[in-house]
Image: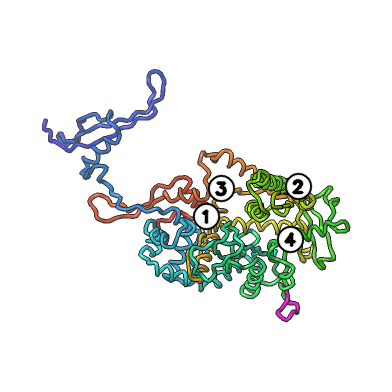
Amino acid sequence: MTQSAGKVHVVRVSKTGYVDKEGRRRDYSSAYLRRTYRDGGKVKNETVANLSSLPDHVIDLIDAGLKGRQLVPAGEAVTITGSLPHGHVAAVHALARELGLPALLGPAGRQRDMALALVISRVVAPGSKLSTLTWWADTTLGADLGVDGASTDDIYAAMDWLEHRQDAIEAGLARRHLAPEANPARMALFDLSSSWMEGRCCPLAARGYSRDGKKGRLQIEYGLLTDPAGRPVAVRVFPGNTGDPAAFTQITEVVRDKFGLRDMVMVGDRGMITSARIRALNQREDGTARPDAYGWITALRAPAIKKLMDEDGPLQLSLFDEQDLAEITSPDFPGERLIACRNPVLAADRARTRDELLAATEKLLAPVIARVRAGRLTGAGPIGVEVGKVISTYKTSKHFHVAITDDSLAVTRKQDRIDAEAALDGFYVLRTPVPADELDAAAVVTAYKNLKYVERDFRHIKSDDLDLRPVFHRLEERVRAHVLICMLACYLTWHLRRAWAPLTFTDEDPPEQDNPVTPARRSAAAQAKASYQHDPAGQPYRSFRDLLDHLATLTRNQVRFAATQVTVPMLTEPTSTQREAFRLLGTPIPLTLT
């Protein structure tokens, strides 16, 4: 017999459905190293070795080697030459494109790319412009938008370009969200806030009432205009000593003259829409009535409410025996509807807070009284100075009567004044000229309470998400551009929070309130999120900021394979949460932003 040597190869044999002697069904697989040869013109096989006991990956290596493939150590097969965070900027950029934000900013070009990068950066990693400049090189945002090599002058030029585009950008947002087609109620919300400045050279910086509690610091004021759901539409920056009424007048002119909107209903708080502003709202400079009259909704101040509650006034406690909302009229407010509300929960909270503050003030005064009684503090002047240092700490000095002599100090509560204030606890009265057939009493209350959405936007802009404060810019136009960037970032954040509600602790479906006066409640599903912290599949719920941080772990890697010099971009395998985040945005995970 003549036998010629042949090449060896790996053969895999599988046997399914085999039944052994005990009647058990079993599947078998085996692997053999075999050599093929010819014997008398016939092809035959010879088993060289039984490989069945080896691990599968070892068998695969033997098979690949016998087939002539070049094998390299696992650590040398692939080299990752670079890796950048990608998921967070990709998600925000995808939503920005879905909302048409690039086109809204202006014509395509480097300035627009820089401005868009500044807005996205403010959402993902808010910081100073210089820190943003270095951050761009550490994510895929810089490379994909072509801004990773930008200089500080480039950033400032982009901010100046964006500031000149503000009116056009806000007009576009107003057409989307305030025009009658999108806003059948023709309603807009407006509120004012402030943030302190670093430095003393900005013309807008001034001392005023600080809503950040930064007394004695220079600040700016900025007013935010939103649709009824709190979606930001426009922002205006004012000097730090601007009052609420003056800001309201300016934003009304913007809505009427620049946006061209008619028959609007403006909603603002009691300090903003004053009687003087109401008279000026629908009058020309010559005092004649404007044909394009605006409606408004605001609230009365405490003295006006007290006057309504006098013995012969229309606001009596008996109105609230069986309800907590009543519509009344008063000759002091001709042509207006007054909607009086009483919230028992708010009344109890204010009473408790007042008692705590009065007790805290008396505690601060006790050591001063003891020093006077012991003779360690004498003289009406020195005693008055010491009392003045502490009695206004909790803003309760109006409730105390202070009697000072050279050797005595007596502090007593003004109980009649405390009782008078307590009588107003839980009461508020809204005023509006909008007819009842257009807006019933419950809808008026709901519209006014929707100012909470603007306050929420201020929290997001100032601290929670976008970190507007403090402001470091010195030039007026740069300050305005900085605030505009934060407003546009808030616009993106508003939509992101809504889209990602299933992944976060956000209440996806707040229950409808039968009574708008009662406090808002979270849904049972939102309470379950807070209690269990994980969804039914075991995935954790996250805060909005934590979700962005998790998306950042989705990186784009530059991969080089063995024996090549070419790198290929590849994404890491997304987690289920990352996949779901992009699905909720209605977009696949992109390899690049452009």
**Mark 3 highlights which residue?**
502
Alpha carbons under labels 3 and 2: distance apart: 33 Å
Camera sees residue 522: no
**Mark 1 highlights which residue?**
465
Of callouts 3 and 2, the N-terminal one: 2
Q: Quadrant of residue 359?
A: top right
Name the kind of residue labelled 3 in the image.
Pro
Of callouts 4 and 2, the N-terminal one: 4
x and y, in percent, of residue 194 in the image: 58, 62
- On screen, residue 368 versus residue 164, left or right, reads right
x and y, in percent, of residue 168 in the image: 55, 72
Alpha carbons under labels 1 and 2: distance apart: 33 Å
- Majority secondary structure in the magenta region: loop
Camera sees residue 528: yes
Front position in the image: 22 or 324: 324
Name the kind of residue labelled 4 in the image.
Ala
Q: Is residue 290 magenta?
A: yes
Name the kind of residue labelled 1 in the image.
Asp
- On screen, residue 241 versus residue 264, left or right, reads left
Of callouts 1 and 2, the N-terminal one: 2
**Mark 4 highlights which residue?**
299
Name the kind of residue labelled 2 in the image.
Pro
**Mark 2 highlights which residue?**
344
Q: Is residue 277 above or below residue 468?
A: below
Q: Nearer the viewer, mark 4 or mark 3?
A: 4
Disc 3 to disc 2: CB gap under 8 Å:
no
